[in-house]
Structure formats: C-alpha cells, structure tokens
Amino acid sequence: MDRTVPRTGSEEIELYIRTYYSLLRSTTDVQIRTLEEVHANMGSALHLHARGIMPDMSAFIYSGLRLPACVVQVERVILGQGQEVFQQGGFPEIKSWQPVFARARRRRGLFDGTDTLALYIGSRSDIDDVLPLLTAFQIEWNKLHVLLQGEQVRAFLREPLDTDEGLAVLARGIGVEAEDLMRLRSVWGVSFWPMMRAIAERTKRFRVRLLRGSLNDYRRATQLWWEHVEAAEPTLLHRPVYFVSSNTHSLANLYTGFALRHQEELIRFLERPEHADLLAEWQQIEARDVPSNRENFLYYVLKKYLSSPHGAELAEKRRQEELACGVQRVVSEESFDVETQVIELAKVHPEWADRRLRRLELERLRESDALVVNIDYPLGMAAYLILSYVATRVGETRGVYILGKAATLNGVIGDVMIPSVVHDEQSQNTYLFENCFSAADVSSDLIYGTVLDNQKAVSVRGTFLQTPRYMDVFYREGYTDIEMEAGPYLSAIYEMHRPKRHPQDEIVNLYGLPFDLGILHYASDTPMSKGKNLGAGTLSYFGMDPTYATSLAIWRRIINLELDRLKGEPAPPEARSPGSRVREE
C-alpha cells in the first residue's frame, strides 16, 4: 500500500477558496465580479477557457444546469441554513417565496419573483459549489452579451427562426460554432430564445450574501433536519439501523416492486406521442433485441410518470403500498434538501420484492427489529455532519453503505468503482478500509458497464475546484475515482469507532470496524473527455444500469447480515468478507 499522500500544489485553488471565504465574512452583499479574476486564474478543468473572448459553452451549460431557471432574472443570492436563518437575516416573508430547483443539482431554493434567490446550504461544501457556479455562469453570460450587441443580431432575436437553419444564422452572426448553440437549445428547450434575448438585453452582475456560516449553524441545521425524521419514527432511538446514503428511488423500488405491479398503466403512459422513443425502447426490451433489464426500465418510467401531471393518483397508491411494507418517506421542508426513507424490515412483503431480491428465507425478516435509514445523497461535508449526528440518535449502527456518482479517470460512463483507499481533501487524511463489496457483488447485474474494484478514490472540495494538473497528480499516484462524499463519511466513521475527533493529514487505518462498511461509486462523467457527463445527456441505461446493480448489492448485503443475525449465528465467512452474494431462489 502507498505510504505517500499526493499533493496538488495548487496555490491558485487555495487562493480562490481563501478569497471567497474572506469576502463572505462581510455583512453586506458581495459582488461576484470581485471573484472573476481569481476564478479565471485557477484554471479549473471545468472552465478551461474562462479567460477567452469566446464563450466556453461547456462551462456555461454545466453551471446553468446546476442553478435554478430563475437565475435569468436573479441579481441577488442569499445563503442560509433554514427558514429561521432567512427570517432572522431580514427576509421575514421567505415562506411565501416560490420554490425553485436546478435540473442537475439537488439544492432547495426560494425565489421572490423579482430578483432575489435564497439557497439552502447544509455545509461549507455548498459554498464551495455555489460560488464557482455563479462566477462561471456570470463570466460566460457576459461574454455572450457582448457578442449579441450587433443591430442585426438583436433584430433577429426579436423574431427568431426556430430551426437548425435559424441557429446557424445566429451562430454566424456572433461568431460561434452552430454546434454550441444547438447544445444550448437542447438544454434550455423552449426557454432558449427568451434566454438569448435576456442575455442580449443586460449584463449579469450577481451579488451574494452569506447570512450565517459557522460550524455550529450547520450542526443546528442538521439537528433540525433529523428532528423531523425522529418525529416520524420515534423508535429510531432504540432500534438497530443499517444506514444507507444513495437516492430516493432505487432501494424503495427494489424492496416494494411497485412499478412491476402497475406495468400496464406505465406502458399506457409511454403511448403518449412525446414518449415515442421510450415506447420503442420498451418494445425492443420485450422482444429481447437489446439486453436492457425490463425491471430497471419500468422503474425509470415510474419516476417520469410520477413527476408528470398525470401521475398524482399513482403517487398516492405508491405512498400507501410503501407504508404497507414499512417504507416511510420523510421530506425535509424547513432545512436543506435531503429526503429520508425509514424502512421497517419486519413489514416486508416477500411476494412484492424485485425478483432479484427474492430468496426462500425473506419472510424471516418479519422477526427483525432493524430499520434501514436511507438518505438522499448529501453534498460534501454535509455527509460528515449527517452521519456524525445520526450515529448518536439510533440504537445501534449495524452497517454503513454509501452509493453515489463519481468521475472516473480510467473508466467510462456507467462503470462501477469500488474503492479501498480514499484520500480526503477536506481533512487531508488518506483512509484505508475493508470495503465489504467486491466486483462479484455487482458484475452479474451490470449489463453495460465494467466493475472496477480495489480502486483509490479522492474526495474533492468541489467540482470546479480541480485543475488538469490537480487530476494528473492524483492519477499518477493511482487515484482514478473522484467524488465529494466518501472522505467526509469516513471522517464520521472514524469518530464512530475511535474515542476522539478524526485527525488531520494522516494515513488512517479503519480496518476492524464493529459494523459493516461498503462504498460503491458509478461513473457519471469522464473529465479526461471534456463535456462527457450524465448531466448533459438524455436517458439512458448508463445511469439506470449501475444504479440498480449497486442498489441490489446493498440490499443483498443487508438481507444477508440480518437473516444470519436472526438465526442467532455469526455471519458466515462469505457474508463477512468481500464478494459475498445472497442466495437466490
């Protein structure tokens, strides 16, 4: 095992971080333009052409997808941990503001309808995310604004020709590649031309204010978030728990099999003209012309259906059936946006579960007193705050399982990475641990990707806070898995096992934990191939395939351990060691 910790030596990244934190100490609004120079000097891998005269469309699209659509109107952004913070900070009417969300970043926002956006933050990682997003968006908006000032161009925008030919005309008029404008139109859809007119009309001059930013404020926000969960399930204080950090759909879908019992209604939804491509894909799956998994496809369609105006009735049916098999959803309403599912194993319906989970002893779970607490994957340091607090508020932690997206430096989109070493840029620690998962636990359910185990991961501070040199240094040291949460989670796990706070800048051995630990990442982008990420594309199974393959591995692990415990036996070697599989019917 390597005994050295790679150093990026990026003074530019450190200067950028110090600059915006020092500015945010101000009790007045901070102008984002103050950060533009230091942002460009950093040379972010996501914003390589920040200094260029021509727009960096990749950076503009990336930042735009991670900000609410109302950002077109926004001039002022306020950051706080919850409603109480906003109200005490001078915004007493915050409850009446309009809820807004970004397409590719889960962060609760409220818009006053005019020019002010309030964003909920759960840790300093949200600041490391929001400030670079706003800066990159403003830089690229203002580049486009300059290009759109010609009289002929502005006349064209008033009555645009909404075709590929029209885009080509506009591209020639402002001197950019038509392909870049097509990418923008693909992302913005019907909002493309109004957005272009808004860019032409005015420059963007964001102002930002942080209302509160102490560690205590984030801890208080975490406590308020968890109080809602405890109120929904008070027995958490006295019952054993398997903690999972994943998403709000895959575990519940596999456990309840709800979509599979409502297949006919879901397929009728696909018969609408706007879903012709999905219907064709379903027909290919049924004809076995493609190897895609039919259950995974139905789970995807269920998510789309429930988010449409037509799915309200089915959403209520799902709520009732989930409650019947012990799945309780707790939505965070006054704090940061992390939904929780509390799953009572004793209420299992073996005949409902996904066929890939069924085994002869599944009904034995009805004797269990254990709960599965599944949270929607938090951002960065919020992971540390959440697990640190939750571990003090449950009867016993029997397992911690972490599933999330990551960038890969040696794979392709859809691959699964299983690390056994994680370097954390927050603590500067390198964590060594025994991952309970191996390739054998995932590979048989992964159709399109490859499983890469024994990997080395690095948990970074933010997506923009990386440079090509930064990635190259880690890649040379064998780090190929880049994400934001594994390191903070491992810092919390250290404190669940040791009698002191996690160290700084050390090599930390986490072998011999008194509970199960598993980390699974699936590749959502490849930073070595610029612009290739799930957030910029449409469906398909590059996201669904690894999500469900890894979720199945987590469920099997929990079921295996809990059934062995109910038998009064220690976990057999195949359950204790990596590579174990649940015996299927």
Image (tube, grey):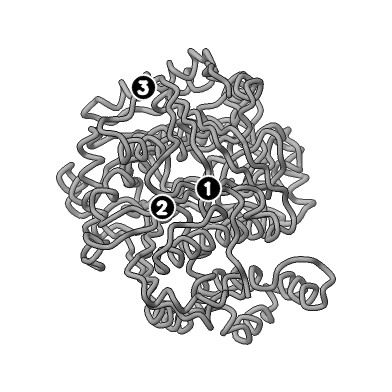
Please name the amino acid that badge 1 sits on: Cys
The residue closer to the viewer here, 494 or 384, is 494
Residue 25 place in picture, x, y as percent: 25, 25
Instruction: Provide the residue designation for mark 2.
Output: 399
Identify the mark at residue 504; answer none if there is no mark.
3
| Residue at the outermost front position | 569
Residues at marks 2 and 1, CA–CA distance in whole angstroms: 10 Å
Q: Is residue 523 left or right of residue 373?
A: right
Image mark count: 3
Q: Is residue 356 visible?
A: yes
Name which residue type carries label 3.
Gln
- Which secondary structure, mark 2? strand
Closest to the observer, 222 or 39: 222
Q: Which quadrant does the C terminus fall into?
A: bottom right
Q: Nearer the viewer, mark 1 or mark 3?
A: 1
Lower position in the chain sequence, tag 3 or tag 2: 2
The mark that comes first in sequence, 2 or 1, is 2
Marking on residue 436: 1
Question: Dots 1 and 3: beta carbons under 8 Å?
Answer: no
Give coordinates of residue 348: x percent, y percent.
43, 77
Task: Single out the mark in the foreground, 3 or 2.
Answer: 2
User: Residue 384, percent across and down?
Assistant: 35, 40
Residue at image point 80% right, 73% down: 284
